[in-house]
Image (cartoon, grey):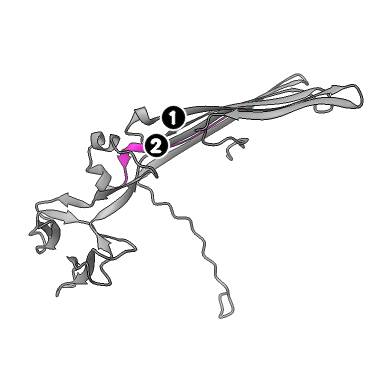
Amino acid sequence: MISENSRIVAEFNYVNEFYSRTSIGAHSSWRFGKNIRLQTSYIREKDDENNPVDVHLSNMPADSLSQIITDDGYFTISTAIADSSGDYRSIDGRWVYAGENRGTHTVYFYRENRNGGYVRTYNNEGKMLYTYAPEDALSQYFPRRKISLPTTQWIGTVDLELGQKDKAHGVFEGAYSGFDPNNYNKKSRRITPALKWDATVPLGKIFRLQTNGWLKDPGFAAFSELNPPGL
């Protein structure tokens, strides 16, 4: 029963997705006798560049998207779409409201945390429209949008365990990781290796020989033990 003393907590996760994404994972383990165990894992997340869910990306040719290179994976695109029944016209490089269905473009405006763009107003019929007024304190709407590039990330590992922990024992882990910063450009793909080991050999009852360490390519994305995907 909800009362004035009740405390309601709402939690949610939000992801600004521009593409549909598929994720797959697999893990297998084999044991051969008491002294050998082999494990393999594979995880991949891939954005579907052929079916973007964003209307603005759907109107851009893949060839132009393949040439984009950014440091953070984001780029900005115009949100004006040619439309003979649109509401806006371009005049001196600015979008001007021409009346309903009297323009040459349909323009989508997005709010940014900065001034210098367009203000949102309403006409006599209550229709929302945008006017360029860079000096206005509420001029935080722009005909553009920050979009992320479609990416693919994967990692595959092979773990080999030899011996027994109270005797001679060693664990050797090898991995390859792959990252495509732009699925439209297959030449941007990066594949990098890594290796980790930890081995111990007893030398009598008092001494033991131990070695551990790792080697990895500077561009390796991640190197940690992969947990089997939850089913």
The residue located at (39%, 36%) in the rendering is 181
Q: CB of mark 1 within 8 Å of CB of mark 2?
A: yes
Q: Quadrant of residue 136?
A: bottom left
Residue 3 picture location, percent across and down: 56, 79
Residue 231 picture location, percent across and down: 57, 39
Q: Which secondary structure is most common in the magenta stretch?
A: strand
The residue located at (12%, 62%) in the rendering is 96
Magenta part of the protein: which range? 40-53
Looking at the picture, does residue 193 appear above or below residue 78? above
Name the one closer to the observer, 36 or 200: 200
Q: Secondary structure at mark 2?
A: loop
Which residue was labeled with disc 2?
A: 181
The kind of residue tagged 2 is: Pro
Which residue sits furthest front? Answer: 218
Name the one closer to the observer, 151 or 3: 151
The kind of residue tagged 1 is: Arg
Mark number displayed over residue 190: 1
Q: CA distance from mark 1 to mark 2?
A: 9 Å
